Image (cartoon, rainbow, N blue to C red):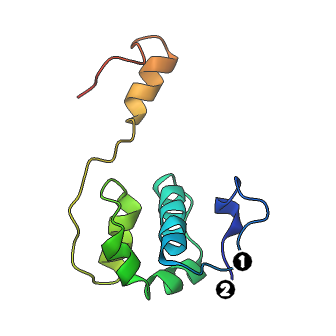
């Protein structure tokens, strides 16, 4: 199984196979996290994930826009959504430019 090893910077050497359901769930999480931050998944991951509905169902990522994108692309039933948890661009810029304290709540 060819994996995107760039999502395993914390593991040396990166795994070459995903033997357990938990391993597959972690891989989905890593790919979705990268996708959420603008790193488009490889075609092999799109193909692979189309066969992993069981993992997507058992280990949902309600705060990941990428997770919901995969589900929609495959025509699977929608899963409950959470908030993204991502900081809006305007808030990050305001913090950098001193207009906001990093710990102030935002709406």
At numbered mark 2, what does the secondary structure look like: helix, strand or loop? loop
Q: Residue furthest right?
A: 13
Looking at the image, which residue is at 38% across and 73% down?
70
Q: Nearer the viewer, residue 91 or 16?
A: 16
Q: Say the numbered circle drawn on residue 1.
A: 2
Q: Nearer the viewer, residue 76 or 97?
A: 76
Q: Residue 25's spot in the image, x, y percent?
A: 47, 70
At numbered mark 1, what does the secondary structure look like: helix, strand or loop? loop
Quarter of the view holding residue 3: bottom right
Q: Residues within 10 Å of mark 1 (few under 14, many from 20)?
A: few
Q: Nearer the viewer, residue 81 or 12?
A: 12
Q: Is residue 48 above or below residue 81?
A: below
Judge from the rendering whether residue 7 lies leftward or rightward of residue 36; answer left or right: right
Q: Say the numbered circle drawn on residue 16.
A: 1
Q: Is residue 54 above or below residue 62?
A: below
Q: Residue 59's spot in the image, x, y percent?
A: 36, 68
Q: Residue 90's spot in the image, x, y percent?
A: 39, 29
Q: Dividing the image into 4 quarters, which one contains the C terminus?
A: top left
Nearer the N terminus, badge 2 or badge 1?
2
How far apart marks 2 and 1 lie (CA) works out to 7 Å
């Amino acid at each position: 199984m060819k994996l995107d090893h760039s999502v395993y910077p914390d593991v040396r050497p990166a795994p070459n196979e995903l033997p357990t359901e938990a391993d597959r769930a972690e891989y989905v999480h890593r790919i979705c996290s990268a996708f959420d931050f603008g790193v488009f998944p490889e075609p092999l991951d799109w193909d692979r994930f189309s066969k992993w509905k069981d993992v997507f169902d058992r280990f949902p990522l309600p705060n990941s826009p990428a997770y919901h994108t995969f589900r929609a692309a495959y025509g699977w039933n929608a899963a409950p959504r959470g908030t993204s948890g991502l900081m809006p661009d305007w808030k990050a810029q305001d913090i950098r430019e001193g207009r906001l304290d990093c710990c102030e709540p935002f709406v």
